[in-house]
Amino acid sequence: MSLEPFTGLTVVDLYAGSGALGIEALSRGAREAHFVERDRDALDALRRNLETLGIGAAATVWPLVLPRALARLDAVFARADLVLADPPYGGEEARAILETLGVAGRLAAHARLGIEHHAKDGLPEHAGSLQRTRERRYGETVVSLYRTRAALAAPAEPEGT
């Protein structure tokens, strides 16, 4: 078992902004990161950050409007290990992300999904094939972690594999 939990992972950073979450994953050993952002200024900052850090080869930037364009990323989601989403507070976009990614077969069976949202947004315990496994509250901010039900039902792999 690797000591670095991101080693070799494919990470998707939805609502990436300047790319902090995906860049952090790359710095911790992720194989590749896909950054999805629609705001032109944020995209410029993201591209500058990737260039400055010299990690552009491991990054793909998708200038897309979310959640509307999620279907354009189906091939990426099918092989993603970790999807991170930091949508605008208000709940609607966070719920749309959950509903879309919760469609059976959209995410890789082993994938994990982390969504940052406001405490008042009240995300559901499950959405389609996704089940919330953990929730952490930091003041008014909540991070909800989801796994596919297939992954939760699978037997755990023994250490060292």
Image (cartoon, rainbow, N blue to C red):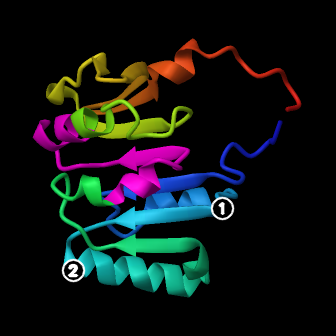
The secondary element bearing badge 1 is classed as loop
Q: Based on the displayed image, in which of its 4 quarters is residue 47 positioned?
A: bottom left
Question: Residue 64: horizontal and vertical position, in percent?
Answer: 24, 68
Residue appearing at x 69%, y 42% in the figure: 5
- Seen at 37% across and 53% down, the residue is 74
Q: Give the range drawn in magenta.
A: 73-97
Q: Does the magenta stretch include residue 62?
A: no
- Label 2: how many Cα within 10 Å (few below 14, some 14–19, many 20+): few
> Residue 139: x, y in percent?
30, 31
Q: In which quarter of the image is the N terminus?
A: top right
The furthest residue to the right: 160
Judging from the image, what secondary structure is the residue with disc 2 in? Answer: helix
* Badge number at residue 108: none
Left or right of 141, for residue 106:
right
Instruction: Using a 10 Å C-alpha cutoff, classify the residue at mark 1 as few (fewer than 14 neighbours), some (14 to 19) or many (20 or more).
Output: some
Q: Position of residue 22 (x, y in %)?
A: 49, 60
Task: Give amino acid for label 2.
Answer: Arg
Q: Can residue 23 be seen in this view?
A: no
Give the residue type at disc 1.
Arg
Residue behind mark 1: 31
Q: Pointer 2: what residue?
A: 40
Question: Going from the N terminus, do you reach mark 1 or mark 2 first?
Answer: 1
Q: Residue at x 47, y 47 (%)?
A: 78
